[in-house]
Amino acid sequence: MIKLSNVEKVYRTDKIETLALKDINLEVKKGDFLSVMGPSGCGKSTLLNIMGLLDSPTRGKIEIENRPVNNLPDKKMAYLRNHKIGFVFQSFHLINDLSVVDNVEIPLLYRRIPGSERRRKALAALAKVGLSTRTKHFPSQLSGGQRQRVAIARAIVGQPEIILADEPTGNLDSNMGQEIIDILMDLNKKDQTTIVMVTHDERIAEQTNHIVRLFDGSQVN
């Protein structure tokens, strides 16, 4: 599903150059559930952003389903992000002024889908994460775990083949965190969704199929 070949990422300013990723070679197969681990500042989120086409490598090649994507036009890149990839973030990124179901519909607004179909898909995604009774609530009325469930529903509403999750349990206690991992594992097993997850939690990482470890921007395993 995803292949990175000799990927390097350098951030440059007028006075300093920072090597965020160095010589990353990684294959994520269809249906895989991969954890990315390492200390803060080692390049985990940068790696996830490059996989999700939110950032471009300074050097190296990215392929999605055996198709090089480095030099795609912006519109085609945006299409891939919207149709192939779902994103889950540590801080949820929900819009407080929108109801739960309206938050979940957001990715579908960029597709030519009638409003009734958007609503049906959003309600189905919320049912999948166990939030059918919270559709009209607002994010401020939910617990942290419930907000992360909404974020997952938003990520899967367009039925992407890939989910990229950046510390999805980082703001949750251990019980709520395990509930979120159980949902992701269920999506992986039942729907064969390919998942790449950044985490600091060894206990959670060990539940996934593979672990990739980074240190100072390099793979160490």
Image: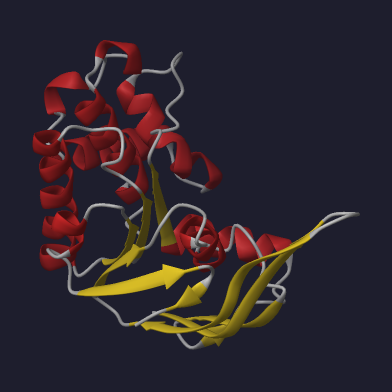
The C terminus: image quadrant: bottom left
Residue 128 visible here:
no
Q: Please name the residue shown 20% across and 30% down the image.
A: 145
Q: What percent of the width, then of the height, locates residue 95?
A: 46, 23
Q: Disc count in the image?
A: 0
- Closer-to-camera residue (186/7): 7
Q: Residue at coordinates 82% horizontally, 58% vertically from top-left?
A: 16
Residue projecting furthest to the right? 14
* Image spot of residue 163 (x, y percent): 35, 59
Say left or right for 63 vs 184.
right
* Of residues 143 and 173, the one drawn nearer to the viewer in this rendering: 173
Pick the quarter of the image with the N terminus: bottom left
Q: Quadrant of residue 161?
A: bottom left
Q: Residue at point 14% right, 34% down?
A: 176
Between 182 and 204, which is closer to the camera in this rendering?
Answer: 204
Question: Which residue: 27% across, 11% down?
Answer: 141
Q: Nearer the viewer, residue 119 or 2?
A: 2
Residue 18: tell me if it is visible. yes
Q: How is the image coloured?
A: secondary structure
Is 14 positioned to the left or the right of 93 in the image?
A: right
Q: Position of residue 152 (x, y in %)?
A: 29, 43
Quadrant in the rendering for residue 131? top left
Q: Residue 18, located in which quarter of the rendered image?
A: bottom right
